[in-house]
Structure formats: structure tokens, C-alpha cells
Image (tube, rainbow, N blue to C red):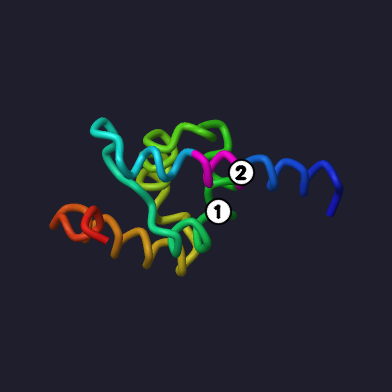
Amino acid sequence: MTAAFFNTVRKVSLVLALTTPFAAVSSTASFAFSSEAQQQCTGDAFRLCSSEIPNIPKITACMVKHRADLSPGCRGVMDRDLAAQKSGKLAAQ
């Protein structure tokens, strides 16, 4: 793979690392990804929702919209995290 690709991955990872904690404590954030979801879904986010990066709520909406196209690992962890978020458990972690 090219150096430009790795540079882009590094930049997006940095953006996600910096914005995720803010999204987790922000009162306007609708969903905060777990670290496992970030690991499982980064490739899917690039593949399916790159136009939405770094806007986490838009990435989330895009990933939900493309649920059928997600990798099995990403789909599983997103389903679990979304269910936990709906029941209020993710925010407590």
C-alpha cells in the first residue's frame, strides 16, 4: 500500500482518537463508539463512509444505513453497542 494511504489512515485515526472522548461526554452526541467498535469498524468507515469523516454522528448514521454492507465483526459490535446505548449501559462504561 502507498505512503499516502497510510498517512490518511494515521490522520483519520488521530481525528477519531481526539474526537471520540469529546463525543462521549458531549450532551449533543447521540452515540459514542466503544474502542472495540473503532477497531472493528475503521476499515468499514473508510470504505463506506469516508465522505463523512471526521463527523462522528454522520459516520454513525452512514454505518447504520450501510449495515448490510458492514464486515461481520463491525456489524456485531455495532449492534451490541447500539443496543447498550439504547439501554443506557454504554454511557456508564
**Residue at point 77%, 43% (across, down):** 7
Res 84 → quadrant: bottom left
Which quarter shows the N terminus? bottom right
Q: Nearer the viewer, residue 18 or 87?
A: 18
Q: Position of residue 35 (x, y in %)?
A: 45, 60
Q: Position of residue 14 (x, y in %)?
A: 61, 43
Q: Please, what is the dominant secondary structure of the magenta stretch? A: helix
For disc 1, the marked residue is 42
Q: CA distance from mark 2 to mark 1?
A: 12 Å
Q: Nearer the viewer, residue 3 or 72?
A: 3
Q: Position of residue 76 (x, y in %)?
A: 37, 67
Mark 2: which secondary structure?
helix
Q: Position of residue 30 (x, y in %)?
A: 26, 39
Rate crowding at label 1 as few (under 14), some (14 to 19) or many (20 or more) other CA atoms within 10 Å: some
Instruction: Residue type at mark 2: give it.
Output: Leu
Q: Is residue 15 magenta?
A: yes
Circle number at residue 1: none
Res 23 → quadrant: top left
